[in-house]
């Protein structure tokens, strides 16, 4: 099922303990689209300034991404973000943000974008998310991301937007901030009560968790010896997650399918952090993804033939029946 994504398209300047880059290609829509394009056709709805050239557009075009709904604003500047990561790559300091043309962004969708059956709403202003959602009333799967800015400044609008989607993808701190709940599970369960069928809590280097009405599923991040830049990892995760769901034509997504999507999101995100910005994902091949999915499956399996516990108060229990389990 074709996918439409709307969100930021940006230039990022980033410094980490392992190097730095000036004005590298970034933004929610870019990271998401590059990942999701491994699974189905992607239409990007966004805006850029005159400083965004054909070379940047070609990064998306080479992956088969439809860029016809990216508006280039005459005389404008593309959204720009500068950040600094310390040794703890889970946290960062924002040094500069220049909204540029993104400040007046009003998503304009072509017929092709409106015809998509899957929609991802990046972390733009919640009222804009709702306006885009209204243009795809028959979408079978709609997922939403947001950020602490909108939780602080537009919480009521964000809650209204959440009620209109199928899946919410936030990091664990944002879920707690949004709900006032003390932990990810209780926060996700409250959000489920607002209407979505699934909530994904991103946990950075610790992985991600999926919460539905039927249960809880947690998956660790893929173990890497080299992590260079986490910028865009969450959006890449969303691209892999939503992209996989787009390959399933049924309107209802079972917990099993959602768990498989978690594996795809986790795997794509693991490639993203190996180099700066989109550098690694631009070169990524399908066979590399398949190999890492297989390795993640191997790493998260275990078997246990018995559980020889002692209960001194009530006597030794019977051995646990043999079983195999995997994440």
Image: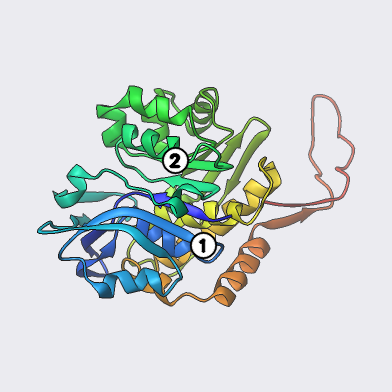
x and y percentages locating residue 80 in the rendered image: 18, 56
Q: Nearer the viewer, residue 260 or 71?
A: 71
The extreme front residue here reads 111
Marks 2, 1: nearer the viewer: 1
Q: Nearer the viewer, residue 34 or 76?
A: 76
* Label 1 crowd bin: few (<14), some (14–19), many (20+), radius 10 Å: some
25 relative to 115 in the view: left or right: left
Q: Nearer the viewer, residue 129 or 293?
A: 129
x and y percentages locating residue 245 in the rendered image: 60, 51
Q: Is residue 187 above or below residue 55?
A: above
Q: Quadrant of residue 233?
A: bottom left
Mark 1: secondary structure: loop
For the question of whether residue 293 can be seen, the reply is: yes
For the question of whether residue 81 can be seen, the reply is: no
Q: Is residue 213 above or below residue 288?
A: above
Mark 2: secondary structure: strand
Residue sitting at x 61%, y 70%: 290
Residue sitting at x 27%, y 43%: 106
Residue sitting at x 19%, y 43%: 104
Residue marked by disc 2: 144
Q: Is residue 123 above or below residue 183?
A: below
Residue sitting at x 43%, y 57%: 43
Residue marked by disc 1: 41
x and y percentages locating residue 126 in the rendered image: 34, 33
x and y percentages locating residue 261 in the rendered image: 60, 53
Q: Earlier in the sequence, mark 2 or mark 1?
A: 1
């Amino acid at each position: 099922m074709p996918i439409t994504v709307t969100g930021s398209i940006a230039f990022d300047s980033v410094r980490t303990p392992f190097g730095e880059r000036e004005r590298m290609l970034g933004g929610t829509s870019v990271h998401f689209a590059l990942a999701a394009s491994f699974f189905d056709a992607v239409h990007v709805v966004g805006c850029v300034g005159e400083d965004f050239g054909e070379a940047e557009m070609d990064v998306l075009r080479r992956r088969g991404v439809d860029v016809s709904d990216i508006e280039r604003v005459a005389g404008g500047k593309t959204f720009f973000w500068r950040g600094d990561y310390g040794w703890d790559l889970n946290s960062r300091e924002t040094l500069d943000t220049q909204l540029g043309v993104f400040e007046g962004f009003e998503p304009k969708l072509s017929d092709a974008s409106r015809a998509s059956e899957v929609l991802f709403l990046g972390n733009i202003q919640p009222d804009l998310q709702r306006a885009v959602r209204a243009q795809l009333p028959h979408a079978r799967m709609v997922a939403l991301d947001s950020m602490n800015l909108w939780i602080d400044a537009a919480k009521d609008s964000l809650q209204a937007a959440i009620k209109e989607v199928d899946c919410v993808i936030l990091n664990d701190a944002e879920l707690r901030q949004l709900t006032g709940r003390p932990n990810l599970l209780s926060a996700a369960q409250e959000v489920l009560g607002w209407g979505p069928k699934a909530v994904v809590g991103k946990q950075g280097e610790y992985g991600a968790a999926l919460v539905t009405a039927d249960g809880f599923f947690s998956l660790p991040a893929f173990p890497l010896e080299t992590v260079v830049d986490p910028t865009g990892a969450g959006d890449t995760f969303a691209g892999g997650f939503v992209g996989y769901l787009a390959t399933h034509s049924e309107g209802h997504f079972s917990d099993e399918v959602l768990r498989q999507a978690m594996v795809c999101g986790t795997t794509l995100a693991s490639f993203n952090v190996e180099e700066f910005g989109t550098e690694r994902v631009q070169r990524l091949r399908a066979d590399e993804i398949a190999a890492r999915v297989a390795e993640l499956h191997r790493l998260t399996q275990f078997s246990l033939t018995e559980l020889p516990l002692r209960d001194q108060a009530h006597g030794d229990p019977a051995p646990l029946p043999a079983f195999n389990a995997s994440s």
